[in-house]
Amino acid sequence: MTDILVIGGGIAGVSAAARLSHSASVTLIEAEEALGYHASGRSAAAFIEDYGNATVRALNSASAAFLHENDILSSRGMLLVGRPDEAEDHANEARAFGLDRISVTEARGLIPILSPQHVAHAAYRPDMFDLDTDRLLQAFRRQALDAGARFETGVRAEAITRDGGRWQVTSGEREWSADILINAGGAWADDIARMAGAAPIGLQPFRRSIARLPAPGSHDVTGWPFVDGVNEAWYAKPDAGKWLVSPSEEDPSKPMDAWPDDMVLAEGLARYEEMVTEPVTRVEHSWAGLRTFAPDRALVIGRDPVQMGFYWCAGQGGYGFQTCVAASALLAELVEGAATTLDQTTVAALSPTRFSQ
C-alpha cells in the first residue's frame, strides 16, 4: 500500500514523485526498464523561455530560477534564419521569440556554414540555453528516493479499479493500492484515464525526428548557437562535438516506441542543406520521440473533474523539461490542498476541468 501511486517514469512522473514524497508515501511505476525512456530520453534539451503559448510560458518563467540556480542550464543562444521569400514570417517569428534582427554577416560569424546566397534574414538572442536533461531527471529522482519514494520499472499498468475509496492498479500478478493516482503517462495518458474510468482529454502524440551528423566541415561547433528555420522548417544545434539536425516534423502517431521515417528525415535534411554551405555526407545516428499535446497546447495538471483521487500530469508536448519545476510544484500544491504559487488564471488554464465545461 502507498498513499500516492504515480504512473509514468518520464520527467513529469519523476518530478511529481519528488514533490509529493515529502508529505506522503509515494510509489512510481514505469512500463519500461529505465526511467526517461520515451519522450524524456529523446528531448532536444533546450530551454527557450518564450516557447509555447502564454500558459506554457508562465510555467517556463516559473521554472527558470530553479534551473539556473542548480546549474541545469548552460548558455547557447538562438539564431533564426530565413530565405529571401520569408521576410514577413521571419519578422513575425523573431518578434514572438524576442529576437533582435542581425545582419547575415553577423549570423555567419556565429555559424560560418550559413549560405550567403540563401540566408537573407537573421535574428538572434543570447539567452537561450542548453538544458541538462539527465542531471535534472536524476536530481528529482534522488530527491524522491531520499524522501522515501519507491521506483519500480518494467511494470505496465494493465487494469485500474477503484475499491473502497482506494485505487487498485494491477500488472500481471502484482497489485498496488493507493489513495491518490497520478496520471503521468505521457503519450499513454488518455489510455490510463480510460482504464481508470475517467474521460480522455483528447491528447495527441506527434512524432519528431532528429539526426546526429559529424561536425560540418570539421568545424568546432561547440560555441555555435541553436539555429532554427522559419516556421520550424528544421532546427540544428551542437551536441558533444557533433551536430544535431531535426526536420521539426509534427506527424500524428499512436502511443508507441517511436522511430524516424526515413523520407521525412531526408526531406528535413534537404531543407536544412539549402541554407548551409556544407552538404550532409553522413548520418551517424537518428531517432524519434513523441511530443504529446492537449487540444489547446497547454499542459494538463490537476484533479480529474469526475474521478476522485485521480490527478493529471500530462500533455507536456515539447515543453516537459523546461516546465517540470513549476508543473510538479503546482501538482503537489493541488494534491495537498495548499495555496498555489502560480496565478489563478494560469492554474485554471492548466486544469483538466477546462475540457468538461
Image: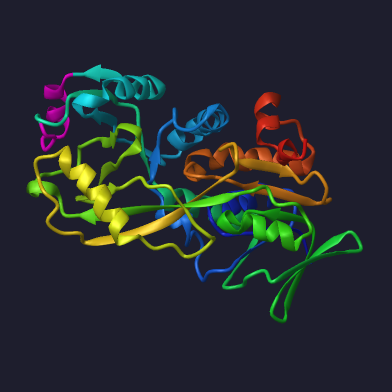
Q: Quadrant of the N terminus?
A: bottom right
Q: Is residue 279 left or right of residue 6?
A: left
Residue 168 image offset from top left, x and y in percent: 79, 67
Q: Which residues are magenta?
A: 103-115
Tell me if 237 is positioned left or right of 14 in this view.
left
In this view, 207 is above or below 111:
below
* Coordinates of residue 218 in the picture (x, y in percent): 8, 49
Q: Residue at x 56, y 28 (%)?
A: 58
Which image quadrant is residue 71 in? top left
Q: Is residue 111 magenta?
A: yes
**Of 270 and 49, the residue lying toward us:** 270
* Above or below, 73 relative to 83: below
Q: Nearer the viewer, residue 102 or 84?
A: 84
Q: Is residue 244 above or below residue 118?
A: below
Which residue in the rendered view is the most extreme toward the front?
85
24 left or right, relative to 230: right
Q: Is residue 61 located in the magenta-colored stretch of the structure?
A: no
Can residue 146 be seen in this snapshot? no
Percent across and percent down for residue 256 are: 50, 64
Q: Residue at horizontal 31%, vertical 54%?
A: 264
